[in-house]
Image (spheres, rainbow, N blue to C red):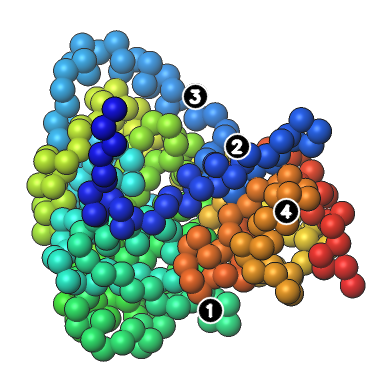
């Protein structure tokens, strides 16, 4: 059988971090001590029953058995506009300022391809979600990550972007609450980002993946588009996976600047398929849930975060408390790199966590753990780590 080579573009892509972690997990002999995987995050609670009922009913509608529009049904675009007005005070044109697609991954990788030209730079942060780096590569653009430091709350300082990089910039990508550090955006951060975008005439993409998961229930993440002038320069990508426990349903949307939305829609018609009509109908039901109901879906993460904080304190493991998302970003013990510490935990405790350097060169002294596993497994993993006495003192 012939062995065909991948294209140079594919060869140049970094190995997917989570694929590497899956391979590590597969090589662990868990017959005596089962592996506990805290390396990745997929919501494990059931989708709210009213959303499921809506899908079941919509699946019987013959109109949903046909190909759906690339633009999405008018009902879902209207529901998205109503949701953003209710939750963030943002007015949107359902026809010109909204795009829908099968999961936010499509937009986070597709919008860069729709906007960037070869030789330009995608500017983001270091560390960042690894997809941003591969999105730059797939766009034949370069990547620059603004170094993030714990001393500044893992918020970017745009003055650190070299002038030549800024002038070659073709897109600024931010993600707050931040994966992997858990940092929360402030109005001042978004104002600085918008000023940077305006100074260098850059479009701004905000990946709002953890829109409903702040550091506690009252600490609601803020939307980029709720900031003055933001829609002039930016778009925001929203996923139903985390906020509505719909990870397997694959539905997301982008909202904001009409020219960016238009460019992405054109790419979408050439690169991706449409969203099943019944899923769109169920998404309408989700978006119409009361705000209090949506907030309650994230309560389990807040509860687990507090339990983990208590256990880490007992272990003398220092941790920054102001963290959103359903992950925690933790420093490794002195004398370890993140990669070394991951190996130690895997082989001696059968606990798999994500190494910081998988998210960027500037994160080699950290690991990321997930709060999405069952509470009992999460606490059992911490008990195993505590037994190794890394932070005894």
Is mark 3 in CB contact (under 8 Å) with mark 4? no
Residue identifier under label 2: 26
Q: Secondary structure at mark 1?
A: loop
Residue identifier under label 3: 49
Report the mark closest to the observer, 4 or 2. Answer: 2
| Image point (26%, 45%), residue name | 6
User: Which of the numbered marks, if any, corresponds to residue 345?
Assistant: 4
Residue 215 visible in the snapshot: no
Q: Secondary structure at mark 3?
A: helix
Q: Earlier in the sequence, mark 3 or mark 2?
A: 2
Residue identifier under label 1: 149
Is mark 4 in CB contact (under 8 Å) with mark 2? no
**Residue furthest toward the front?**
1
| Image point (57%, 51%), residue name | 326
Q: Position of residue 283 (x, y in %)?
A: 34, 33
Report the mark closest to the observer, 2 or 1. Answer: 2
Closer to the camera, 91 or 59?
59
In whole angstroms, how far apart are the C-alphas of marks 2 and 1?
33 Å
Q: Is residue 160 left or right of residue 339?
A: left
Q: Is residue 388 left or right of residue 88?
A: right
Q: Secondary structure at mark 2?
A: helix
In whole angstroms, how far apart are the C-alphas of marks 4 and 1?
25 Å
């Amino acid at each position: 059988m012939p062995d065909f080579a991948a294209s140079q573009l594919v060869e140049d892509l970094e190995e997917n971090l989570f694929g590497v972690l899956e391979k590590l997990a597969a090589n662990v002999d868990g017959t005596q001590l089962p592996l506990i995987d805290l390396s990745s995050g997929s919501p494990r609670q059931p989708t709210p029953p009213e959303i499921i009922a809506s899908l079941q009913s919509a699946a019987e509608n013959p109109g949903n058995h046909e190909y759906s529009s690339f633009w999405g049904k008018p009902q879902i675009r209207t529901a998205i506009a109503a949701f953003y007005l209710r939750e963030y005070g943002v007015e949107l044109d359902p026809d010109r300022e909204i795009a829908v697609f099968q999961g936010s991954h499509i937009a986070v990788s597709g919008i860069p391809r729709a906007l960037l030209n070869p030789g330009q730079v995608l500017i983001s942060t270091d560390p960042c979600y690894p997809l941003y780096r591969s999105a730059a590569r797939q766009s034949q653009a370069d990547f620059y990550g603004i170094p993030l430091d714990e001393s500044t709350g893992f918020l970017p300082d745009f003055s650190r972007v070299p002038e030549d990089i800024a002038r070659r910039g073709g897109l600024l990508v931010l993600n707050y609450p931040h994966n992997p550090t858990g940092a929360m955006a402030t109005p001042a951060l978004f104002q600085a980002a918008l000023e940077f975008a305006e100074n260098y005439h850059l479009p701004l993409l905000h990946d709002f993946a953890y829109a409903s998961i702040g550091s506690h229930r009252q600490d609601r993440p803020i939307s980029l588009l709720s900031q003055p002038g933001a829609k002039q320069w930016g778009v925001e990508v929203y996923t139903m996976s985390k906020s509505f426990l719909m990870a397997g349903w694959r539905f997301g949307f982008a909202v904001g600047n009409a020219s960016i939305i238009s460019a992405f829609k054109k790419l979408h018609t050439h690169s991706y398929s449409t969203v099943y009509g019944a899923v769109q109908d169920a998404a309408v039901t989700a978006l119409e849930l009361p705000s209090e109901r949506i907030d309650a879906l994230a309560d389990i993460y807040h509860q687990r975060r507090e339990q983990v904080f208590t256990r880490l304190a007992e272990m003398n493991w220092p941790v920054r408390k102001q963290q959103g998302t359903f992950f925690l970003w933790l420093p490794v013990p002195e004398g370890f790199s993140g990669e070394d510490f991951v190996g130690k935990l895997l082989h001696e405790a059968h606990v798999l966590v994500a190494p910081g350097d998988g998210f960027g060169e500037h994160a080699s002294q950290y690991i990321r753990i997930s709060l999405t596993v069952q509470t009992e497994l999460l606490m059992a993993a911490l008990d195993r780590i505590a037994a190794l006495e890394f932070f005894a003192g």
